[in-house]
Amino acid sequence: MDNPIVSVIIPTFNRSSLVCETVKSVLAQSFSAFEIHIILDGCTDNTESELEKLKDPRIAITKLKHFGRPAPGRNVGLRLAKGEYVGFCDDDDLWHPKKLEMQIEKLNRFPKAGMCHTGVVYFNDDREWAGGFAPGSSFRDLIRRNFVVNSSVLFRRSIIDIVGFLDEDPDLRAVEDWEYWIRVVNRMPILFVDEPLVRYRVHGSGISSNRIDMHNRRIALLRSVRKKLDLGIGLVDLIILECIVKRQLLRIKAASKKFNTTSAESN
């Protein structure tokens, strides 16, 4: 599409069946003036050939070497994007047909807002359920918990000129989107559509399954935000300390469990 209003960015790695289902949910939008940039993160399966079968001129495929994390692919998509608005979607999530229409309408009503996210329904192979954090609206809210689901966000492309691109630091893997939203909300209001416009697929394991690793990444995120935003000593430091304590308690618990297992085996 020559003049898209929305640019949708979907990084993917070796998930041909899932990403095709995701792309079909985007193609089914009631608002149709969009382009889709699918960024192949070094795919070695049949993802490219399966996507080509969809035969929609709004789809553009870009192939990269394998990075193993979404931030580099999303940044490539941001540089390719031509739309006034940008939406991220993970390669296994699904959009409600009215998602873009409802978010664009809300952003048009509040021109000072930089981005808009929505409610979510979680699902797996067996069931679906509501969940997640209650939405907030402030920097303090978002520093404490990530209530923004990546696949639900639509933001103005112009915010890139204000907050830059996503941080590609490997230490921020699985939290680079959260770090980005914090930078956005520090500069401008964010909006929320209180409707479940995204179906978020839950897997048995994944990037965020290890709780100690997640504390490590959250500490890295908070330190990154503090440095980028030139924050003094305050709330961020308290949350970092809280994360360090929780991480240490998990390590003690794991060590105790290992000790008890070893003792039982020796007896």
Image (tube, grey):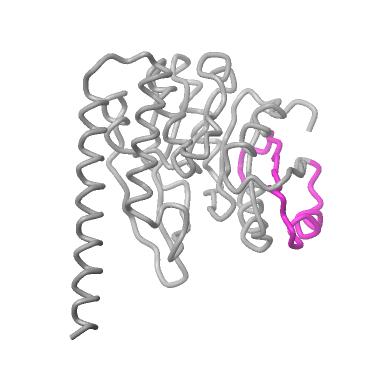
Examine the image and state in which quarter residue 236 appears. Answer: top left
Residue 109 appears left or right of 37: left
225 versus 210 height, above or below: above
Residue extending furthest front?
266
Residue 109 appears left or right of 141: right
Image position, residue 83 (x, y; %): 67, 26
Total label count? 0
Q: In which quarter of the image is the N terminus?
A: top right
Image position, residue 140 (x, y; %): 26, 25
Image position, residue 166 (x, y; %): 54, 29
Q: Quadrant of the C terminus?
A: bottom left
Residue at image point 32% right, 48% down: 132
Of 231 and 126, nearer the camera is 231
Image position, residue 263 (x, y; %): 19, 77
Of 76 and 3, nearer the camera is 76
121 versus 168 height, above or below: below
Q: Does the magenta stretch include residue 40?
A: yes
Q: Does the magenta stretch include residue 62?
A: no
Of 23 and 10, nearer the camera is 10
Residue 141 appears left or right of 152: left
Residue extending furthest bottom?
267
- Which stretch is magenta? 29-57
Residue 30 appears left or right of 193: right
Residue at image point 46% right, 63% down: 203
